[in-house]
Image (cartoon, helix red, strand yellow):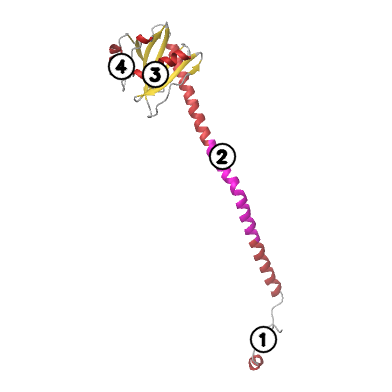
Amino acid sequence: MDNDPIAELPADVKQHMTRYKAPPGLERRIRHMIAQESRGASWLDRLRGKVESWWPVAASFACGVLVAVSATTLLGTARNDDAFEQQLVSAHIRSLMPNHLMDVASTDQHTVKPWFAGKLDFSPPVVDLASEGFALVGGRLDYLQGRTVAVLVYQRRGHVINVFVLPASDDRAAAPKPLLRQGYHIAQWQKSGMRAWAVSDLGAGELDQFAQLLKARE
């Protein structure tokens, strides 16, 4: 079968038509262009394949970055908590020095509570637990985290318990959380918009009992 399209033309057209000879190298250039196009398609396919293969790695990396940022944030929070707990213990130790324990000395909650009025921008809850073995003996002002705080002073068998009180920064209800720093136990809790930390050399069990009683009575 003849595949020459010119052979199918009418005789009179073929007689008067003008023939042109392809310039040298045209076929080579056409073949080169086709080859280049082919290679381009391959390169795109390879690139697409690489992107698809690297996508899980990139996603994992992004997740890793998020985890690292979260871990750094949590670590920063933990360090801030440690620093504050160290401030609490230092304030407790400082209070045990002569004439540092109380600004107002009284076993009457109705005397201690009004004493704070006008000295703070909040009113700390003052509870007497003498009947449960934790006697209120007074209160004072202290300075923690860049602000003035209320401190309620209790005693149990000669052991001093300092209760540091601040307005809560959020509404979460934190359960008592016993901690140990430099031989002193710390119990912390939150209730009625206030956050409190009790510091003492009492055993953890007794301090936790005190924290539960105080929280229940606030």
Q: Measuring from the top left, give residue 62's x and y in whole percent.
A: 55, 43
> Disc 2 designates what residue?
64
> Which element carries disc 1, helix, strand or loop?
helix
Is residue 24 shown above or below 14?
Answer: above
Kindly report the distance in space between the C-alpha atoms of the residues bearing marks 3 and 4: 14 Å
Q: How far across and down, in percent of the image, does residue 132 sit? A: 37, 10
Nearer the observer, 160 or 26: 160
Q: Residue at x 56, y 39 (%)?
A: 64
**Label 4–label 2 contact, CB within 8 A:** no
| Residue at mark 3 | 143
Alpha-carbon span between mark 4 and mark 2: 50 Å
Q: Is residue 206 left or right of residue 13?
A: left
Q: Earlier in the sequence, mark 2 or mark 1?
A: 1
Q: Is residue 18 left or right of residue 69?
A: right
Mark 3, residues whose alpha carbon is within 10 Å: few (<14), some, or many (≥20)?
Answer: some
- Foreground: disc 2 or disc 1: 2
Question: Magenta span covers which residues?
Answer: 42-68
Marks 3, 4: nearer the viewer: 4
Q: CA distance from mark 4 to mark 1?
A: 112 Å
Q: Mark 1 is on which residue type?
A: Ile
Q: As drawn, which residue projects farthest toward the bottom?
A: 12
Mark sitting earlier along the chain (3/4): 4
Image point 63% across, 52% down: which residue? 50
Examine the image and state in which quarter residue 130 appears. top left
State which tag comes first along the sequence, 2 or 3. 2
The residue under label 3 is which amino acid type?
Tyr
Front tag of 4 and 2: 2
Q: Determine which residue is flagged by label 4.
A: 116
